[in-house]
Image (spheres, coloured by chain):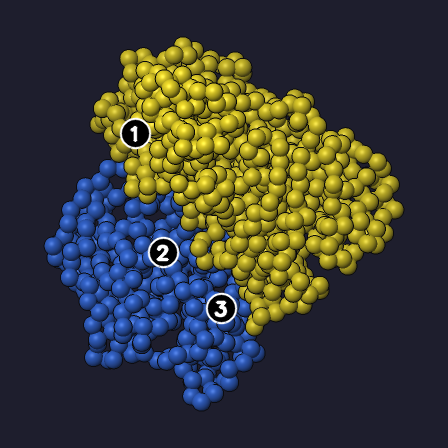
Amino acid sequence: MMNFSYARAESVGEAIAAVSGDPHARYIAGGTNLVDLMKYDVERPGRLVDITRLPLREIAATAGGGIRIGALVPNSDLAYDARVERDYPLLASAILAGASAQLRNAATTGGNLLQRTRCYYFYDVGAPCNKRAPGSGCGAIGGVNRIHAILGASESCIATHPSDMCVALAALEAVVHVAGPGGERTIAFEDFHRLPGDRPEADNTLRHGELITAVELPAPRFGPHHTYLKLRDRLSYAFALVSVAAGLELEGDTIRDARVALGGVAHKPWRVPEAETLLRGQKPSREAFGAAAERLLQGARGQGDNDFKIELARRAVVRALEQAAAATPQRQSDKSIN
Amino acid sequence: MPEGYVGGAQPRVDGPLKVSGLAQYAGEFPAEDLAYGVVVSSSVAKGRILRFDLEAARATPGVVAILTHKDRPTVTTDAESHQDQAAPPGLPFIPLLDERIVYSGQPVALVVAETFEAARGAAALVRVEYEAEPAVVDVAQRRDSAYDPPEKRDGVPPPPPPRGDPDGAFAAAPVKVSGDYRIAVEHHNPMEPHASTVFWRGGKLVVHDKVQGVTNTKAFVVNMFGLPEDDVRVLSPFVGGAFGSGLRPQYQLTLAVMAALRLKRSVRVTLTRDQMFTFTYRPDTLQTVALGAGPDGRLQSIRHDAIACTSTYEDYQEAVVNWSGLIYACDNVSLSYRLAKVDTATPGDMRAPGATTGVYALEAAIDELAYAAKVDPLELRLRNYAERDQNDDKPFSSKELRACYERGAEAFGWSRRSPEPRSMREGRDLVGLGVATGCWEAMMQPHSARATLTADGKLEVACATADIGTGTYTILAQIAADALGLPIDDVAVRIGDSSLPMAPVEGGSWAAASAGSAAQMACAALREEILKHARAMENSPLANAALDHVVFSGGRVARADDPARSISYADALKSAGRERIEAKADFAPDEEFQKKFAAYTHSAVFAEVRVDEELGVVRVTRIVSAIAAGKILNQMTARSQILGGVVMGIGMALHEESMPDRRLGRFMNHNFGEYHIPSHADVQDIEVIFVDEADEANPLGIKGLGEIGIVGAAAAVANAVFHATGKRVRDLPITPDKLL
């Protein structure tokens, strides 16, 4: 871990000015991922600007019937917020599927979006990694890659995004509010994270100095017909091999609309609108769900160790849609799967 | 005053210190002149260091020294000086010896600074240029070069010679099974990382080391650095788990001593979690088991062959296959154990070394045989019950394994198992029930102890053994309290100090039997001393009392036939003009007994799993572990040992796996996020049963418990997964992909 300077920002403007003027500066909030990465020498910021005192801790109703979640709302507070539990149980479930109680207490909403990959090679400065050290090569291709991407990967990077919360946010079609030196803007969730391409060092479309201020959710849609199904190498405290956030709008026994996002399979939460379209007007059935899964996984490619994830993801999508249809989501307290 | 502490449920005497944070561990001892060392690890697995660039690191404020192979204190380099009590044959790894790299993660430099932060920052600036050579870390790639180790490791029996005609019997057997078994590499990963704090005291060293044997560490430091015996004292009062990783002195110790000698000041070196993956581990072992049996499942042939990895510089050995000639009765047996060299650190003893590995393969194969013979797996084990150790052709000192099977099966509800795989369901889940046998040696070692009684009626027992979380403090206090009839609160236990009476490394489950026997002997000697002083008192009511006519209870020695005639210890000492009396005892195992009898602990482990087959999710919903391990000294700490072993077995069956990159020669998932040990959600109902077992190998009948809990546990889970799914996964861990 390298020496760095530290300053606490008192306002959003002050924070943005401090970071945007210094290419080696980074924001820090909960620090649950950044500090780890600094200890591993993966991240070597010269300056940390502490944003934890900024007034971004509100969960407020929006005019459109949704909510706007301040970037500094801790993951635990968000998961146990009464409105979120009632209107966005998919989000609460996804948050509680991740990390540990202690980490969720410290981690923030904005920070969760900015988690970096758990790729072994990214974490190990003794190994090659294009994301950490552009041009050094991808160690995971041809290496140990059971946790790696099956969709949207490139020749230079097969890392996955590790967040659970973001998979739910993708299915909920969240909007990310950011402020930066050039003013404020919003980013649709599907445009926030990016695929690695030939620039895997960039996880997302934020520009240097931009700060996430809030995440907005549209009005709730799915009622009880949702699930966050997370499959992993142990029952708790492990990153997803494959996860599925699913929500169904049912009219009688007909699917009016559906949202399905996959986690653990790509450099970003994976959504395929055509797969969701396939479900519209269908009756819930394994056949219909299977067809949607096939479409979601179209073009999936294994890297060796992770070949199994293609089949696992297909089965997980079917099961998740069954759970959503039956309103029997995976329980995160005891990890039981219906 | 309770009747006695031994055999009861005694909370840990060191518990309050641990939960209040007052117990100090190796990396916590403070010193005024302390400097901090941070290890720089090699990123290549094989080759040599071409050059260092230390400029930026040296320029970091606070850096006081950077040790490398080019710049370090002199160490003795002959193999003999580097041996330790647990060393296998070969030349042990010496950090910073020369420019050669022999494994990935090998320490190549130690950056020492005034603060930990400065040392860590500077360590990140050290640049090392290597000339890398291709490395092989997968033992399967070295199968063809496997060899019989020319020099055998002390204390590890080589496989017994073949008996009968195993090949002929296998060929003729009406029922046969054969399979290849493998367990992923596991790193020990105790919660407390390895650390050494070396106090420099005017040329003398006081070493706080995370280790399972202070006497071993002391001899190692003395020999390696050519120091006088009296100049080195090693302390390790508390150890935050070890599982065998603290049996041998590890490289952070050598580096910390080097730096202290170089700088003539105190130095601490604490390893990071990722560096905990850069020394010992449970060796990757390729196993083949072939069993032949009659239609009734009675064994006619057992063949068990193993090829285990070792490093390029040492021949680490453990007893992997011997169990297959021991646990079941069979007249035709052939066992082999060979080594193959890989470019990693030397593997080492990890909880029940050898047995955990070999018994897994045997017990999975026995399960396969049961299905092939269509005999209930428990019944098949009973039909092949060994009444005698056929490896060494002698009777067991005691063996209550049959009672383990019976009581375990009853508690578990084995009778509700339906025989066919995939025949039990609960909701969407497949349910499976599995059983396995466990076995471990009941060993003892020469061991000394001292007991001291002071005039205020307080007793201290002391010896150089360790408590790695097993409960050594507590059982020694129980034994001593009973021996002198004192409340346990009046007994202090001192261990983990090389200046105390001799103890070997604490391992092999021998500490309770060895240290416990020595402590009891020392206390017995004290009793004689107390009685001597009591009898010598003027008008003593015990004037003519012989030792076997008195009782020691409540801090008093009294006539057995007339307890009113008694003298307090305090009065006896006072009358003799003594502030304290002391007795030392040297325990040695009874060699005659050991020649005559085979001594083992046994277990029967029952596991229930639920499997979501579509998604490959396995839950271990229930384990019953029935243990026969001689006298149980403490129901609480004993149960904890078995619980811990079972959880580790669940981890072996389902989770633990150090994954090597075969091109880089490096284990890649070196942290607790990606190296999976069972989480709370993975551990449900575990029931521990101790069956009565009388044994005479030592006066208390102790056999030891630290290791038996893990042996067989992984096989029971894997066998339950087969029963649930009909899928036989022979390479552990059984991760979801293997069940899809």
Residue labelled with disc 2: A100
Q: Is residue B624 visible?
A: yes
Point out residue B521 in the picture as x, y percentages from the top left corner.
50, 25
Q: Chain of mark 3?
A: A
Callout 1: helix, strand or loop? loop
- The residue at the point 56 percent across, 25 percent down is B445
Q: Which chain is depicted blue?
A: A
Q: Is residue B110 visible?
A: no
Point out residue B476 in the picture as x, y percentages from the top left corner.
45, 32
Observer-side mark, 3 or 1, equals 1
Chain B: its colour in the image is yellow
Point out residue B329 in the picture as x, y percentages from the top left corner.
77, 42
The reply, left or right, for residue B342 in relation to residue B670 is: right
Residue labelled with disc 3: A337
State whether residue A166 is above or below residue B359.
below
Earlier-in-chain disc, 2 versus 3: 2
- The residue at the point 55 percent across, 74 percent down is A290
**Is disc 2 in contact with disc 3, using a CB cutoff of under 8 Å?**
no
- The residue at the point 37 percent across, 80 percent down is A223
Q: Give the spatial CA distance, label 2 vs label 3.
A: 19 Å
Q: Amino acid at mark 3?
A: Ile
The reply, left or right, for residue A311 in relation to residue B32 is: right
Q: Give the spatial CA distance, label 3 vs label 1.
A: 47 Å
Q: Looking at the rendering, which quadrant does residue B555 occupy?
A: top left
Point out residue B237 in the picture as x, y percentages from the top left corner.
38, 30
Q: Give the spatial CA distance, label 2 vs label 1.
A: 30 Å
Q: Amino acid at mark 2?
A: Ser
Residue labelled with disc 1: B29
